[in-house]
Amino acid sequence: MKIICIGRNYTEHIEELNNERPEEPVVFLKPDSALLKNNDPFYFPAFTNELHHEVELVIKISREGKNIQPKFAHKYYEEVGLGIDFTARDLQQKAKEKGLPWEKAKAFNHSAPVSGFVDKKLFSNLQNISFSLEKNGKSVQQGNTSLMLFPIDELIAHVSQFFTLKKGDLLFTGTPKGTGPVQIGDRLTGKLEGQEMFDFEIK
């Protein structure tokens, strides 16, 4: 399986990082070693002093496909969940300044905590789902899929032009505004339409 991530998919997050608004989805990958499941603790890596949380809606691909048309994209996923795209912001900034790839800042071990998944039929409109992240019980990020620049089905269609999607692949769909630092001892809780999806500690 592979983890496909979308950057810069919420306008206010683009603005808070002073990035350019993309004309098409910004795509990057994480290896399967980035996965962190079952509310296991996340261990703060030694190579960064500026680790940021980015909460995201996650789509689990349910069947193989490539060159998928947007109108058929809904047939390629049945479940949605919540995850965090951990980012070593200091490493990322150094790489961006030099025009270099920034996988080391995004794709390191356990940089993709993921919740369990729920049936998409539980939601009347997938493009109007609220989700949030709490740090130590305080809300730090709130988003709604209606604010995506590129909706879920468009993302699947776009990504499938370049990568064959396979059953079990995960698509991180981008983060809303409010990304910020975490420290050892913090506790992160993610909610999807008010339902707790993950709750784990930074160690």
Image: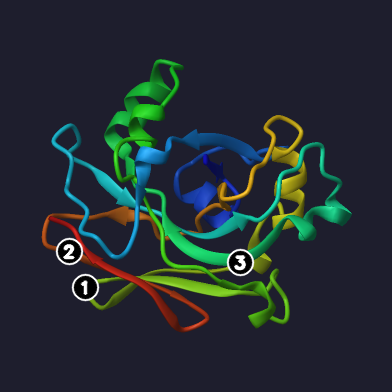
Mark 1: which amino acid?
A: Asn
Judged left or right of residue 149, residue 101 is left
Judged left or right of residue 36, residue 6 is right
Residue toward you, 141 or 5: 5
Instruction: Report the Cα–Cα distance between label 1 and label 3.
Output: 28 Å
Residue toward you, 194 or 68: 68
Instruction: Report the Cα–Cα distance between label 1 and label 2.
Output: 6 Å
x and y, in percent, of residue 104 in the image? 34, 28
Mark 2: which amino acid?
A: Asp
Q: Earlier in the sequence, mark 1 or mark 3?
A: 3
Q: Secondary structure at mark 3?
A: strand
Q: Which residue is mark 3?
A: 79
* Mark 1 and mark 3 residues within 8 Å of each other at the beta carbon: no
Compared to residue 125, the image places residue 22 above or below, namely: above
Q: Which residue is mark 2?
A: 186
* Mark 1 and mark 2 residues within 8 Å of each other at the beta carbon: yes
Judged left or right of residue 176, residue 198 is left
Instruction: Give the residue displayed 85% in from the left and 54% down from the top.
Output: 72
Residue toward you, 109 or 62: 62
x and y, in percent, of residue 17 in the image? 45, 44
Mark 3: which amino acid?
A: Glu
Q: Which residue is mark 1?
A: 136
Q: Secondary structure at mark 1?
A: loop
Compared to residue 61, the image places residue 122 above or below, namely: below
Q: Residue 184 appears in which quarter of the rendering?
A: bottom left
Q: Earlier in the sequence, mark 1 or mark 2?
A: 1
Q: Earlier in the sequence, mark 3 or mark 2?
A: 3
* Mark 3 and mark 2 residues within 8 Å of each other at the beta carbon: no
Instruction: Report the Cα–Cα distance between label 3 and label 2.
Output: 29 Å
* Number of numbered discs on residues: 3
Q: Tag 2: Cα neighbours inside 10 Å, few (<14), some, or many (≥20)?
A: some
Compared to residue 19, the image places residue 36 above or below, namely: below
